Image: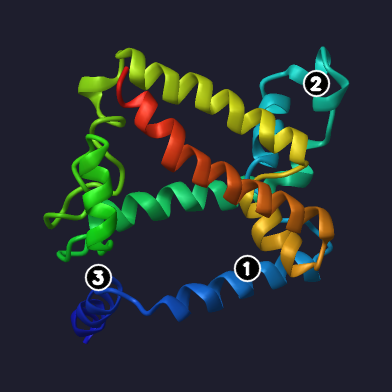
Amino acid sequence: MPHLFLASFYTLVSGPWHWSVSGAVIAAVMFLPLYAGKEFGVSSNLRTACTLAGAGRKYAFFDIDWRAQRWNLLFVAGSVLGGFLAFYVFPSPEPVEISAATVDYLHSVGISGPGETAGSSFVPAELFSLGTLFTLRTLVVVVLGGFLVGFGARWAGGCTSGHAISGLSNLQLPSLLAVVGFFIGGLAMSWFFLPLILQL
């Protein structure tokens, strides 16, 4: 009997799920922090990590009680574990489904479209692979991009998950403005800056 249950469970989690399942889970995850009087966000964990590393002894911004953020650290650890399980334990045999127009655009800027073959990566190997790790192109994307993401999250008072999910669910106007900025930045990166970076 247990092996029948495990087989059924594996069949359930290994196949593609309807998008509404993710929506319902996100709504439930948002309800729990709101009910507990907490704010959800991933970028706040960077502050907690710096506090754990001792940055609070030098900078007042990091002088916080990291134990109050243990639930958020657990969420991030679960996200990493979930990503690992989804890719290595429960991989979908189906290719990543993206539109033909997107694949054509990626080809036009020098990227092999993700999802064209089963098991292919969600991210382009031209930017994210060990073979391109120390190229000028990757250093620009990782170092400069990482700095801009960190600076933007600090300036906006939160990251995409904090504003787009938590802030909007609280009907906060600053979160709406931040999300508009996120989308403008994403569109500018995709259509203007990425083709230039790929030419490096």
Q: Quadrant of residue 112?
A: top left
Amino acid carrying label 1: it is: Val
Amino acid carrying label 2: it is: Gly
Task: Check the image and report above or below for 160 versus 135.
Answer: below
Residue 65 is labelled as none
Q: Residue furthest right?
A: 60
Q: Disc 1 marks which residue?
A: 29
N-terminal-most mark, 3 or 2:
3
Residue 56 is labelled as 2
Residue 14 is labelled as 3
Say how many tags the image has: 3
Q: What element carries label 3?
A: helix
Marks 2 and 1 sit apart, C-alpha to C-alpha, by 30 Å
Q: Please rate how many residues cluster around mark 2, counting C-alpha atoms within 10 Å: few if below 14, some from 14 to 19, many from 20.
A: some
The percent coordinates of residue 23 (x first, y second) are 53, 75
Please name the residue shown 78% across and 41% down the image.
157
- Residue nearer the viewer, 145 or 165: 145
Q: What element carries label 2?
A: helix
- Residue nearer the viewer, 1 or 58: 58
Kindly tell me whether residue 144 is visible in this rendering: yes
Marks 3 and 2 sit apart, C-alpha to C-alpha, by 43 Å
The quadrant of the image that shows the C terminus is: top left
